[in-house]
Amino acid sequence: MLLYTRKLLSAFEKAKAIKEHKKLYIHVQDRIPVSVEDVLWVIEDMTGISIKKYEVTTISEIAYVRGILERNQNKTARILIRSNQSDDWKRYTCVKELSHIAVDEVEDLSVFGEETIAKMIDAKTIERFSDENGNATDKGIKVPDNEIQSEEIAEIIAIEIMYPHEFRENDLAQLKVGKATIASLALYYKLPGIIIQRALGIHYRDLANKMWEKLKSN
């Protein structure tokens, strides 16, 4: 099986594990919008890593860097979130960085965070590495480097945690009949509109459906 396909399935497995762990220990179930603090606690509990998050005015000279994860050898980590962005982006960015802690393997780790993000801008995202049915493929396309895969996997986990899969079909139906808009859904889930749009797009939606079905059958 293609390495990237394995990592895709691993992302959905990890998202499932995080959601199930949260249901076991968080008393308020199915809270929407999803609590970032709940997710942080769950990942701390699952990994044994103590995590602190901070808002800072400057992270990088690169304008599109929204957050950075700093790992330490003493089982601690810091998440730095750029302060001059909207609350919905802060929420999504924090969970994306938390997802790295949950899922990254040794080969995924990189000290060149800005370089990795710059490479992602060129490589684009999951849609480039899937066919019209949402199946992961490297046909005619080079599978991205481990560091880029890691960024994309973290994005997937963040989407699956913050915008639960079980709500999307109904949301899509509401969109089609004009009872909801991307903006109203973004406001409801407290997520950036572009993240809602991506999750409901045909490529990502079909991929997610296939992955969740596969996990049910395992």
Image (spheres, rainbow, N blue to C red):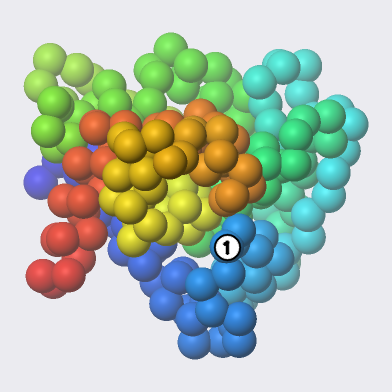
The residue tagged with tag 1: helix, strand or loop? loop
Question: Callout 1: 10 Å neighbours few (<14), some, many (20+)?
Answer: few
Query: Seen in the image, is 27 located left or right of residue 152?
Result: right
Q: Is residue 104 visible?
A: no
Q: Residue at x 69, y 31 (%)?
A: 66
Picture layout, residue 59 above or below residue 159? above
Q: Position of residue 155 (x, y in %)?
A: 47, 42
Q: Position of residue 161 (x, y in %)?
A: 48, 58
Q: Position of residue 96 (x, y in %)?
A: 56, 47
Q: Residue at x 29, y 26 (%)?
A: 127
Quadrant location of residue 184? top right
The quadrant in which the C terminus is found is: bottom left
Picture layout, residue 193 above or below residue 55? above
Q: Residue type at mark 1? A: Ile
* Depth order, front residue of 107/69: 69
Q: Is residue 42 visible?
A: yes
Q: Position of residue 134 (x, y in %)?
A: 18, 35
